Image (cartoon, rainbow, N blue to C red):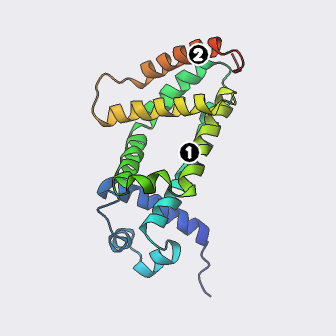
């Protein structure tokens, strides 16, 4: 009797293993052949699921952003005020520091191997991932202000980069507390934006 393979699940397993490979070797330094060797699959199998390395990376971005959204909504759901949300955000960053730094490194490495015009006009996958993250911020904060959501994401990315660069003064809990103060002041000045407090 032939073995029944859940192709979607298998594709996700391959993507999960690729995340660690990209984090370890870098996007630009690893070939599809090396990826196949490390995953212990044939190059034919790898190309069956991913036509090229960029397509593999794009699917990885799609998968990670979907998982991050699920995790974010689970972690932050049910918090009643901005102070609680910022405390949970700080705890989330502490708990997931290694993953977040790896993901930032992988993303930076990918960007280094693209020209600026390509990055500005890049795949719809990257734009969808960014919109997904913005929507989570809006949902969690109870706002509909994508500019503010972008600011929050930029802040989070910034503190992760500071950690990646070895800034010993970055304490995620303290940084998130400061972000909470900033958001509170901003929201008080901008009455048309509503947040659950």
Q: Residue at x 60, y 34 (%)?
A: 75
Residue at 29 percent of width and 62 percent of height = 29
| Residue that numbered label 2 is attached to | 186
Q: Is residue 112 left or right of residue 99?
A: left
* Furthest-bottom residue in this view: 1
Q: Residue at x 63, y 33 (%)?
A: 146
The span from disc 2 to disc 1 (Cα, nearest Å) is: 23 Å
**Residue 129 placed where, x, y %?**
57, 49
Answer few, some or many: residues within 10 Å of disc 2's Cα (few below 14, many 20 plus, some between 14 and 19): few
Q: Are marks 2 and 1 in contact (CB under 8 Å)?
A: no
Identify the mark at residue 197; answer none if there is no mark.
Answer: none
Crowd band around label 1 with a 10 angstrom C-alpha radius: few (<14), some (14–19), many (20+) = some
Give the quarter of the figure containing the C terminus.
top right
Name the residue at the front extreme: 117
Locate residue 39: give its quadrant.
Answer: bottom left
| Residue under numbered circle 1 | 130
Q: Quadrant of the N terminus?
A: bottom right
Figure check: 52 above or below 76: below
């Amino acid at each position: 009797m032939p073995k029944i393979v859940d192709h979607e699940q298998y594709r996700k397993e391959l993507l999960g293993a690729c995340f660690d490979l990209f984090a370890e070797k870098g996007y630009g330094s690893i070939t599809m052949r090396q990826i196949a060797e490390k995953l212990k699959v044939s190059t034919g199998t790898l190309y069956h699921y991913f036509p090229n390395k960029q397509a593999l990376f794009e699917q990885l971005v799609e998968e990670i952003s979907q998982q991050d959204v699920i995790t974010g909504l689970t972690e932050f759901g049910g918090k009643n005020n901005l102070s609680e949300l910022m405390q949970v955000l700080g705890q989330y960053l502490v708990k997931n520091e290694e993953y977040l730094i790896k993901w930032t490194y992988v993303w930076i490495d990918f960007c280094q191997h693209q020209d600026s015009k390509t990055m500005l006009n890049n795949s719809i996958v990257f734009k969808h991932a960014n919109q997904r993250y913005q929507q989570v911020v809006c949902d969690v904060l109870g706002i509909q202000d994508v500019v503010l959501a972008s600011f929050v994401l930029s802040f989070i990315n910034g503190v992760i980069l500071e950690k990646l660069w070895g800034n010993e003064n970055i304490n995620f809990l303290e940084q998130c507390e400061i972000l909470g103060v900033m958001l509170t002041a901003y929201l008080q000045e901008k009455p048309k934006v509503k947040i659950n407090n």
